[in-house]
Image (cartoon, rainbow, N blue to C red):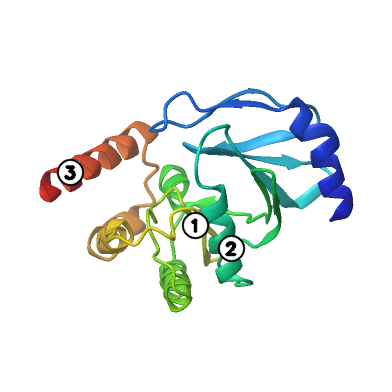
């Protein structure tokens, strides 16, 4: 772990260039020093990995974007749990996290992969575990949960300190049991991304209308 942290300070932090242009859209990664690679980007932070350290990732928050202290506290409360990542180090606006391998449920729909019921049960149990530790699971949707070998994982916990109602996971479960399990799971359809994005946009519009 010390070697990995040393590489972060010597290679990644001096060379990476990230910018949050719009807080409602993923941040822009302008440059990543080799051999580091970008794994993904959210609205406030981006995640990077190094080929020599396959089991850890680095999550760096963009300048002047909030969330670092809150996410560090979330991981402190979660501790070690098989359905969540784990924080090994947190300083200077970045976190070193255990890497979770798998496919998001969103990508699983696109690839036509079957989503077993155990995946949904694992995520339900993980969210109950988080609530028992004074957290409030928030923004848990198809892009923030993954599966591997029939088991479920929660990828993004950055909003788990938000003390407000969030129906995203409950609504996804309803769609799973009412529509996916009896119909789509038997067909193994590969759903194009543009269709998934339309469904996602329609859901967001529905939520805004029902809250107004």
> Residue 167 appears at what percent x and percent y?
27, 59
Question: Closest to the observer: 197 or 88?
Answer: 88
Please rate how many residues cluster around mark 3, counting C-alpha atoms within 10 Å: few if below 14, some from 14 to 19, many from 20.
few
Q: Say which mark, if any, is on residue 208.
A: 3
Q: Quadrant of residue 31?
A: top right
Residue identified by numbered label 2: 75
Residue visible at 57% across and 34% down in the picture: 62
Q: How many numbered circles does the render carry?
A: 3
Residue at the bottom extreme of this rendering? 132
Element type where label 3 sits in the image = helix
Residue visible at 24% across and 42% down in the picture: 204
Relative to 65, say whether 96 is above or below: below
Image position of 93 (left or right of 178)? right
Please rate how many residues cluster around mark 1, counting C-alpha atoms within 10 Å: few if below 14, some from 14 to 19, many from 20.
many
Q: Quadrant of the N terminus?
A: bottom right
Give how far apart the Cα atoms at labels 3 and 2 are.
30 Å
State yes or no: discs 2 and 1 in contact (Cβ < 8 Å): yes
Residue identified by numbered label 1: 157
Image position of 85 (left or right of 177)? right
Give how far apart the Cα atoms at labels 2 and 1 are.
8 Å
> Residue 129 appears at what percent x and percent y?
47, 76
Q: Nearer the viewer, mark 3 or mark 2?
A: 2
């Amino acid at each position: 772990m010390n070697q990995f942290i040393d590489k972060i300070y010597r290679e990644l932090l001096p060379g990476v260039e990230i910018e949050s242009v719009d807080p409602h859209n993923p941040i822009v990664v302008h440059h990543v020093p080799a051999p580091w690679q970008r794994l993904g980007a959210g609205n406030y932070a981006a995640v990077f990995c190094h080929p020599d350290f396959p089991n850890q990732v680095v999550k760096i928050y963009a300048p002047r974007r909030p969330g670092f202290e809150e996410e560090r506290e979330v991981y402190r409360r979660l501790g070690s749990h098989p359905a969540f990542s784990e924080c090994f180090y947190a300083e200077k606006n970045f976190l070193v996290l255990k890497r979770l391998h798998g496919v998001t449920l969103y990508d699983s729909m696109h690839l036509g992969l079957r989503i077993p019921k155990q995946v949904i049960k694992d995520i339900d149990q993980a969210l109950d575990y988080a609530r028992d530790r004074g957290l409030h699971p928030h923004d848990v949707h198809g892009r923030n949960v993954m599966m591997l070998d029939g088991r479920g994982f929660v990828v993004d916990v950055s909003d788990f300190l938000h003390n407000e109602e969030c129906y995203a996971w409950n609504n996804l479960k309803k769609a799973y049991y009412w529509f996916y399990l009896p119909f789509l799971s038997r067909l193994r359809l590969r759903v194009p991304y543009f269709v998934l994005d339309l469904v996602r946009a329609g859901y967001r519009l529905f939520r805004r209308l029902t809250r107004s």
